[in-house]
Image (cartoon, rainbow, N blue to C red):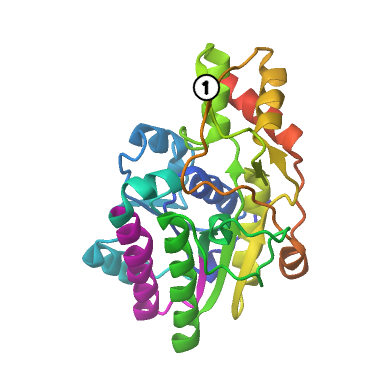
Amino acid sequence: MIPNRNSMGAILITGGAGFIGSHLAERLLDLGHEVIVIDNFDDFYDPQIKRENISSASRHPRYMLLEGDIRDEEFIRFAFNRHRPHTVVHLAARAGVRPSIEQPVICNDVNVRGTAIILEACRESGVRKFIFGSSSSVYGNAKKVPFSENDNVDNPISPYAATKKAGELLCYAYHHLHGMDIFCLRFFTVYGPRQRPEMAIYKFTRMIDHGEELTQFGSGESRRDYTYIDDIIDGVVASIEKVAGYEIINLGESKTTTLSELIRKLELLLGKKARVKLLPDQPGDVERTYADISKASMILGYAPRYAVDEGLERFVSWHRKHR
């Protein structure tokens, strides 16, 4: 039996039709929460993909979709005043390192100004609990591994990373000035069903499966801490339940895989050989990501369940059903 938690009020998710947001909405509905989603269905990638992401959740009686842009102050103020959420999970963002280099002004407008608008709406409507979706990109090319929340992050190497650090700083200011309880969650290379189509795992899987030539930037020795979506959602849900004060928390698997290893694993799962074209390193790409998750373990009880092999197997199975 699903517990009735409606008495605590609704949880509002910005960017709730995206990859992480749609999974979070479904999990919260399963737990008995009322969920309000804000999304503008922009054309960064095919909006129909986001429509499909929420096709199941949108039929739920405790789910509400509000279509609009987080930069539209009038719309946001109306949404917050009308629905009075108890907690906000702010995931809406202009995503991606490379797109941020091509369109830095839009990236800053959405990720910094948009975050300020959401925080101000929280203050005005009395929201006390706030979860901010940050990114491992803030660590840049830090030499010390694994990356700890106490590490200096003053050297971002892309506009996207800079906007995520700016978002964390805005969150701290609102905690300090207005007493809001805020957790900033630094996500490490999240993958799984519904992953954005331009991300490496999705793109490589599709291209290997179709026999297309894929581009590998650099030598293949760059490393990523690939984190399966269900583990990330575990961490976000625990944050909603435990948020108090102000904390920055890493959410990763805390293991790394090279790009070359990733391609080999996908080849084995798909039973096909990749056709690889080597290209130079891309500006803004970090050499590695690697999460120290001891703080997440201590505060959230966070314990990743899916090693990369099992996570990739689950993703490839989903891909075969949906290709």
Q: Residue at x 70, y 24 (%)?
A: 264
**Residue interval drawn in magenta:** 106-131
Q: In the displayed structure, does residue 216 sit left or right of residue 75?
A: right
Q: Position of residue 182 (x, y in %)?
A: 54, 74
Sort mark 1 into few (<14), some (14-19) or many (20+) by Cα contacts within 10 Å.
some
Q: Position of residue 100 (x, y in %)?
A: 38, 50
Residue type at mark 1: give it: Leu
Q: Residue at x 77, y 64 (%)?
A: 294
Q: In the displayed structure, does residue 176 sit left or right of residue 3?
A: left
Q: Position of residue 216 (x, y in %)?
A: 55, 29
Q: How many circles with numbers are drawn on the protein?
A: 1
Q: Residue at x 69, y 37 (%)?
A: 258
The one of 199 and 72 positioned closer to us in this rendering: 199
The one of 40 and 105 positioned closer to us in this rendering: 105
The one of 307 and 282 positioned closer to us in this rendering: 282
Please name the residue that numbered disc 1 is placed on: 214
148 up-or-down from 32: above or below? below
98 up-or-down from 274: above or below? below
Question: Is residue 175 a member of the stretch shown in magenta?
Answer: no
SS at circle 1? strand
> Which SS type dominates the magenta stretch?
helix
Question: Is residue 125 a member of the stretch shown in magenta?
Answer: yes
